[in-house]
Image (tube, helix red, strand yellow):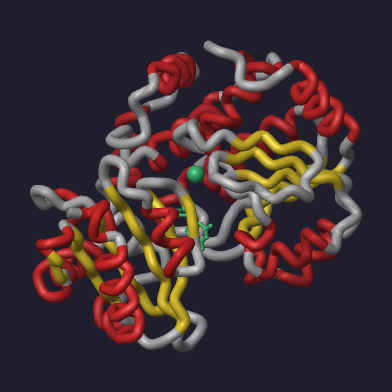
Amino acid sequence: MKKLLEEEILEQLRSTMADAHKIVLTCHTNPDGDALGSMTALASVLRRQGHEVVAVAPDRWPDNLLWLPGMDGVQMYVKNEDSVKSQIADADLVVMLDHGRLDRMSTLGEAIADLDARRIVIDHHPEPEEGADVVVCCPALCAACEVLYRVLDQLGWADDLTHDEAVSIYTGMMTDTGGFTYASSRPEVYAIISRLLEKGVDKDKIYRNIYYTASADRFRLLGYLLYVKMEIMHEFHTAIMTFTNEERRMFKIKNGETDGMVNQPLMIDKMRLSIFLREDTEQKDIIRVSLRSVDDFPCNEMSAEFFNGGGHKNASGGKIHGTMDDAIALVRKAVRKYADKLR
Ligand code: 5GP
Ligand code: MN
């Protein structure tokens, strides 16, 4: 496999980690399989090497990731702010996984900014912050877990990965590629998977755990959203779905359980863009936006321009200040602005 890092940055990584006694691992808000997979894998590797590790996610994760090995060692910042703050107060290193900016951690970002600690970024999102000490950010790779694997490989630690660490890394690569259906045509992806399978990873079971484990309520909601709520802007090959908190109560849907639903309208012939709008569960008049596209439509550019967000070309997110009606109007405006790239 081609080397990802120059010797110099590799040595910086090695010595920064070796010098650290207490290491905090973080990921982005609304953590997904890649965020939690990269965090649980690295937490386990570092603990085996004798480091004290605090792994913390800014907020809630979906129930279908609870089975991920090492999740019992991950803390949820919004639920235990004071306790986490005191645990991380004397940390000397923070490793930011699957995000490159403090503002992708909500209030946890402020707590991290206050620390007197060095910072490493291991990520695959465009435009990481400049304040970190070592930045390994590779937008061309499919997942933070792929970046992490290749870093571990170059450090000479990949052969010693445990079964559970391999499961975490596989999960992140699988979820960030929609089960290897996008951003996953590079042969290196499968070279890594092949080595993870040698660790005994049961990939079919992971696929079932993630994609075929829905509650009945969630499944009914998907049917309802597609049948009742989906608007198709045929001229622009775009589908828009909306989800209110009243509907959330009606279908008994928890935060995170709508993950992936945004992908479904892309199954419709000729669709290029799918946008999912959901009311925030905590803050009034905040609408969360998810965007998914096919081919080269740049969701991240649209999200940065209209929805205070960003992400990857084919998968991005953001938020809108206003009511659902305001959000729908803004989305229609954004779609018209990008008409040339959608027609
Ligand atoms: P999702 O639709 O699953 O919430 O987000 C898809 C992807 O978009 C995430 O994995 C993340 O890369 C990116 N993303 C989501 N929300 C934001 C945001 O507010 N800002 C930025 N920069 N990226 C986001
Ligand atoms: Mn990711």
Q: Pick whichever, 340 or 313, lies toward us.
A: 340
Task: Kindly give the residue lying farthest to the top in the view shown.
Answer: 1
Position of residue 306 measured from the top left corner of the image (x, y, whole percent): 43, 69
Drawn side of residue 36 relative to residue 313, left or right:
right
User: Residue drawn 47% across and 38% down?
Assistant: 172
Q: Pick whichever, 301 or 8, lies toward us.
A: 301
Drawn side of residue 216 relative to residue 81, left or right:
left
User: Residue drawn 17% across and 60% down?
Assistant: 236
User: Is residue 6 visible in the rendered structure shown here?
Assistant: yes
Residue 204: quadrant of the picture: top left
Q: Pick whichever, 155 or 255, lies toward us.
A: 155
Q: Pick whichever, 27 or 217, lies toward us.
A: 27
What is the total number of numbered labels drawn onto the structure image? 0
The answer to whether 330 is drawn above or below residue 338 in the figure is below
Position of residue 336 measured from the top left corner of the image (x, y, whole percent): 25, 67
Position of residue 48 measured from the top left corner of the image (x, y, whole percent): 74, 29
Screen quadrant of the C terminus: bottom left
User: Residue drawn 43% across and 25% down?
Assistant: 201
Residue 110: quadrant of the picture: bottom right
The answer to whether 183 is drawn above or below residue 319 in the figure is above
Drawn side of residue 316 relative to residue 47, left or right:
left
Task: Kindly give the residue lying farthest to the front in the view shown.
Answer: 340
The answer to whether 197 is drawn above or below residue 33 in the figure is above
User: Is residue 197 visible in the rendered structure shown here?
Assistant: no
Position of residue 253 measured from the top left corner of the image (x, y, whole percent): 33, 72
Residue 184: quadrant of the picture: top left
User: Residue drawn 31% across and 36% down?
Assistant: 182
The answer to whether 33 is drawn above or below residue 16 in the figure is below
